[in-house]
Image (cartoon, rainbow, N blue to C red):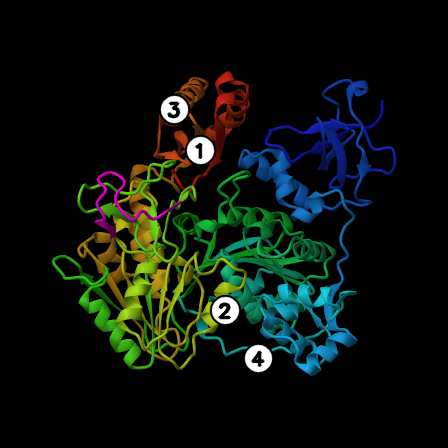
Amino acid sequence: MPAVLRVALPVPLPALFDYLPPAVGEAGVGARVLVPFGRQRMVGVVVAIDAEAAVESRRLKQALRLLDDEALLDPELMQTLAWAADYWLGAPGEAYANALPLALREPKPLPPIGDEYWSLTLAGRSAHDAGSRRGGSKALLALLADGALSAQELTERQPGWREAARRLASAGLLERSERAPAERPLPASSAPQLNDEQQQAVAVVGAALGDYQPFLLDGVTGSGKTEVYLALIEQVLAQGKQALLLVPEIGLAPQTVRRLRQRLGVIVEVLHSSLSEGDRARAWLRARAGSARVILGTRSAVFTPLPQAGLIIVDEEHDSAYKQQDGFRYHARDLALVRARALGVPVLLGSGTPSLESLANAAAGRYRTLHLRARPGAVRPPQVQIVDMRAQRLQHGMSPALLAAVADTVARGEQALVFRNRRGYAPVLLCHSCGWHAGCPHCDRPLTLHAGRRQLICHHCDHRQRMPQVCPVCGVGDLKPQGHGTERLEEALVSLFPQVPVLRVDRETTRRRDAFEQLLAQLQDDAPAILVGTQMLAKGHDLPNLTLVAIVGVDEGLHSIDFRAEERLAQLVVQVAGRAGRARKPGRVVLQTHQPEHPLLRNLLARGYAAAAADLLDERRKIQLPPYSHQVLLRADAPQRDHVDTFLRDARALLPELDAVQIAGPMQAPMPLRAGRQRGQLLLESTQRSVLRGMLRPWQHALFALPSARRVRWSLDVDPIDLY
């Protein structure tokens, strides 16, 4: 009987597929193959060989072509991905596909992994000498006038250079070449003197290099966690090994790359969704070959091959961006722990506001905690003032005390951040005459007014429509924006402080690649400015002249139905407040609220995040919520409500009655209608993870067999972080 290949294909089914080997070549586990699947051809990953076929071999189709002479995924990654697919109830093929950059999911030869270089042609040198180009093209010609530069060097020195490069290359002024990766020592900067706490953290983690050990680096915002990372990566490089550093947001990557490269003197490979697919594939393959020594990336970079692994670091480990919210719903922080165990290396989780899950693991002895309580170079922690908004006369949602603080700050030549975690101009457009408000026709939510575009936009399904001139119900032109988003705050601050630059940083102003970095580059270290922004500005940015943080709205997080809302609010307030006074100048935080006596705010500001988190953990323990219980959420949506309700009732009937498992639902989702689809859910919860896991796979297979499942779109989310 011929050998059988068991192949994982990128389809949302909890199954592997059997094929006969291709006519040419010998497939190995971890190699890619091109196979027929229905009327399509798909690239799959060989998971096992000589497996017993599920059907007679004469009925099996033959793999069309072997794409790799040797395994693309090594045994550690194959084992980790199999575990991850099982734990998060993912389709195996989707889990394996997630590990590969998009360019490697196509039936093409592997791209070369040499370094990409760009240089001037003779015509390009003439164009530079003549000064015949303008803007980005002129700047790029000037950069290359002294010789060829690598793609990474160009990215660091001229963000967004590729568009200009394409124009110049098509005109015959630039040429691209590949060079074999070489150990090129780059100039490295000297490290600052670490304080005692930083030295202790580096010594403790450094002593564990070569063994699996999870560490939680609990450092107040601005305490120098990155310097600890850098010192440890230096030790890893000295041992000839690789370091993987995960960050939650793409916006943090460019400044982190520069800092790593300047300090370490090595090329830093980057993996995130803003890169071209070719660049991502080359970086991934360099890591696989071992030539990439330092890899920096967002969530999906946790799948990077690490044949010479030395250390894994997860920065801002509390951030919800590490959880994939569709498709294969893995959590990159948790997967980093699994990979570190399999690779036998330490994993360092860093945060100024650790998640309650990590704090519970540390309390249980599963993680070793390291503390950074001092802020190197800072005069003192920022002073915090709560402003009671009740009975105050507000200007565009800002209190007199807040505006006075902004005025004082810019008068001293310093910078202020006005934080509002709501983009757009106003969250509601209301008719003052009849009470009509603009609602999304596809969602159960109001449309947000974006005045600059004169559009109403749904932030849930992206429905857009023109702003009406008159009320569509009563015909009166008395339409009033209600509430305040970043766009409206920007408009107000520009009018109140006309002599001061006002920069808005949110998803609207940072859509273009490198726009975030370009916005921050406009800030001068010694000049006044006002920043208006959302949570994008709460994470990891050092602005030495920023001395005031004014937080406009926190009340929404105090009365949410989501049990995680207060934890997230506490983290957000502390992270945003930590932007103030990070250099030698003292910082100040103004927090305005209608709930000045709320226990969370008072506790947070009087005793700090650690005390607030301890109280929240105590509450969770008493009512047996995560991390002291484990949850699985079944979500379903369909155009018709009865299809959702029928499926959820059928799903509930399939569950065994177990005292150890509590079942909530079927019930409507907190947002019952989204993008024109009715939504519902069923929540399973247990304090015994093993009991819950024992019933999940059989239940999942039974769900696929339900006739009512064909009328809905459904998913299972293990350890959900949003019950929406």
Which of these two is toward me, 439 or 349? 439
Q: Report the disc number at residue 641.
A: 3
> Which of the image's four quarters has the N terminus?
top right
Q: Report the disc number at residue 190.
A: 4
Q: Picture coordinates of residue 115 (x, y %)?
A: 73, 64
Element under disc 3: helix
Q: Amino acid at mark 2?
A: Gln
- Disc 2 target residue: 518
Which of these two is toward me, 553 or 196? 553
Q: Residue furthest right?
A: 24
Q: In whole angstroms, how far apart are the C-alphas of marks 3 and 1? A: 22 Å
Classed neighbour count for the residue bearing mark 1: other residues with Cα under 10 Å, few (<14), some (14–19), many (≥20):
many
Element under disc 4: loop
Q: Amino acid at mark 3?
A: Arg
Which of these two is toward me, 208 or 301? 301
Q: Amino acid at mark 1?
A: Val
Element under disc 1: strand
Q: Residue at x 79, y 32 (%)?
A: 63
Q: Residue at x 45, y 74 (%)?
A: 522
**Magenta extent:** 465-482
Q: Are marks 3 and 1 in contact (CB under 8 Å)?
A: no
Q: Earlier in the sequence, mark 3 or mark 2?
A: 2
- Disc 1 target residue: 632
Q: Picture coordinates of residue 22 (x, y %)?
A: 83, 33
